[in-house]
Each structure stands twice: as C-alpha cells, then as structure tokens.
Image (cartoon, rainbow, N blue to C red):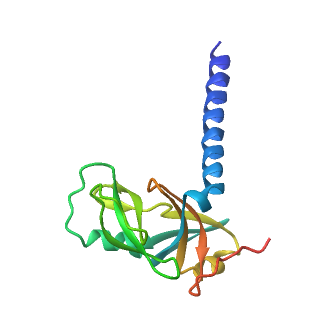
Amino acid sequence: MQKKLMVISLLVFLIFFNYNIYEKEKEKKEIDVNGYTVLFKIKDYDTKYIKEGSHIELYYDLGRSFQGSKYTYKKNYDYAVLNINKNNVAKFYRFHRGERLPKNEILFRFGIKDGYINILPRSFFVKKGTRGLYMQARYGIFNIYRDGSSVFIGFADKNYKTIKLKN
C-alpha cells in the first residue's frame, strides 16, 4: 500500500512538473507576439571549480541599480519599469506603481529574498571544458513577457551576439 502511494505521488509530481515545462515552452514560442527579448548586463562572476565542471554565480548590473533606490519591499516580489536601448540592453528606470507604460518601457517582475533583489538564474553549473565560453559572456539574455515574468534563455558577448556552445 505504501509503495502504491509513493508511485502515485511520484506520478502526480511528474505530471505537474512536465506540465509546467510545457507551459514555459509554449510561452517561449509566443515571445515574438507577447513579449520582448532583452539583455541584462552581467556586473560580476564568482566561479568555483567542481570535479565534473564549474559552478558560476552571476551578479547583474540591473539588480545593483535596484539596490541603490530608496524603496521598501512589502512582499516577495514586485515590479520595475525598464528602459531598453537600441541593443536591447535593459536599464532600471523606476518602480512600477500601476500606471500604463509608454512603448519604450517594459514591465519586469523581480523577486526579493532576504531584502535583496533576486534575478534568476543567479547560479548554475557548466560542463567541464565549457567554462571559457561562459566567461566571455557580458549579458544574460531574457524573454520578458507582458505580465513582467521572465525566462532566462542564454548569454551574449560584448558585441551582443548570442554565445553558442559547440557540441
């Protein structure tokens, strides 16, 4: 009986997990119609070697812009208004107060953890031998949807070109 319960629980979890992946993939396909692809400047890295590869922690310039503003966080997330330049690089403009946005501004939902701005992903593991490619990255590439939610999709170099891994 206990085994059956564990299997059922696992199946429910896997169905839920795969459904969420499906929804995010569906959103990614709709990005041209419903959102924007923008670049967040990477301020700094912190790397650690691990036996099978490297762990890289990212610090975005955008998050530090938020930190400098005088704003009290009342929940686990909030919204900022970003300006996008001709190279699609996002800059913090102001916190959103519910007003309509002009065409040159977009809404960005950010997380707050322990009083700090949390732009995800903040860290990840890279395959052994690929660390050098990631260290060329100067920007994180994000899809930002009209509701302000975002998905990280890759890295770009100093010339705003997507960094592709060689198989």
**Residue at x 51%, y 77% (from the top left corner):** 88
Relative placement, left or right, of 71 versus 150 is left
**Residue at x 35%, y 58% (from the top left corner):** 79
Relative placement, left or right, of 116 versus 91 is left
Above or below for 53 versus 23: below
**Quarter in which the N terminus is drawn:** top right
- Toward the right, the furthest residue is 167
Above or below for 19 versus 28: above
**Quarter in which the C terminus is drawn:** bottom right
Q: Nearer the viewer, residue 116 or 62?
A: 62
Q: Nearer the viewer, residue 165 or 158?
A: 158
Give the image location of residue 6, x and y in percent: 63, 23
**Residue at x 64%, y 76% (from the top left corner):** 131
Relative placement, left or right, of 38 versus 94 is right
**Residue at x 62%, y 18% (from the top left corner):** 5
- Toward the top, the furthest residue is 1
Q: Nearer the viewer, residue 82 or 12?
A: 82
**Number of marks:** 0
Q: Nearer the viewer, residue 133 or 37?
A: 37
Q: Image quadrant of residue 69?
A: bottom left
Give the image location of residue 65, x and y in percent: 32, 74
Give the image location of residue 64, x and y in percent: 34, 73
Give the image location of residue 76, x and y in percent: 33, 49
